[in-house]
Image: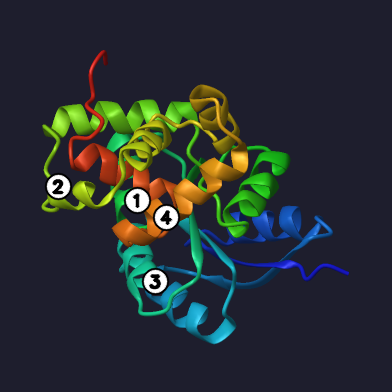
Amino acid sequence: MTTPIRVMIADDQMMVRQGFTVLLNAQPDIEVVGQAVDGADAVAKVAELAPDVVLMDIRMPGMGGIEATATLTGAPGSTVKVLVLTTFDLDEYVYEALRAGASGFLLKDASAEQLAEAVRVIAAGEALLSPNITKRLITEFSRMGAPRGPSKERIGELTERETEVLALIAQGLSNAEIAKHLLVAEQTVKTHVSRILVKLQLRDRTQAAVFAYETGLVRPTGY
């Protein structure tokens, strides 16, 4: 029997926490192991409960979701994945949450199926980076005048093909779509992605996409 995905829910509204708990516990492969009322509580309980995925509200009193996400994902040896939840589909929240280390972004009005699938995708080490999210990222980077990253020289550590794959990741393409675009096997793409993350010291595809925009590898044109 497969070990369930351990999930913790951080939200200052009790009804939201309880609602998500009921929805996720109804899934045979997901188990809600704890709840937190704010960011500081989330950081403390992650250390205690060691969940695989944290559903993190953006707006909470005290330490908010973005600060808590940065704290959790920046901790040495951290493996916890953060799925940011918000009521408001606002560009700055998308950008700041992903930049803080979140692996994905979901609106609170998502269906039970979308929520459960998002947890599975992130727990598997993938990134929840839909084309709509990518478009908002591009818009936000354009507004902020990207690139602004301090480490453009790190792009030079990549091979020509790895650089090409990174650019496609930043456009929101999946491994299968990248493989089709480059006319290579999907396993080859997976190997390239793994090497990119190691060379650039990034957590996942989401961080790779942010890196690509911040360094100017992909430019926000046409938006």
Res 97 label: 1
The first of marks 4 and 1 along the sequence is 1
The first of marks 3 and 1 along the sequence is 3
Give the residue displayed 14% in from the left and 35% down from the top.
146
Image location (x, y in percent) of residue 48: 54, 86
Q: On the rendered structure, is 8 left or right of 144?
A: right
Residue behind mark 2:
152
Res 129 label: none
User: Is 56 situated above or below 117?
Assistant: below
Residue behind mark 4:
195
Q: Secondary structure at mark 4?
A: helix
Residues under labels 3 and 1: Cα distance?
12 Å
Residues under labels 4 and 2: Cα distance?
17 Å
Give the amino acid at mark 1. Ala
The first of marks 4 and 2 along the sequence is 2
User: Is 108 situated above or below 167?
Assistant: below
Q: Secondary structure at mark 2?
A: helix
Contact between labelled residues 1 and 4, with CB atoms less than 8 Å apart: no
Contact between labelled residues 1 and 2, with CB atoms less than 8 Å apart: no
Can you tell which of label 4 and label 1 is closer to the viewer? 4
User: Is 177 situated above or below 81?
Assistant: above
Q: On the rendered structure, is 132 left or right of 14?
A: left
The first of marks 3 and 4 along the sequence is 3
Can you tell which of label 3 and label 4 is closer to the viewer? 4
Give the amino acid at mark 2. Lys
Report whether residue 4 is seen. Answer: yes
Residue behind mark 3:
72
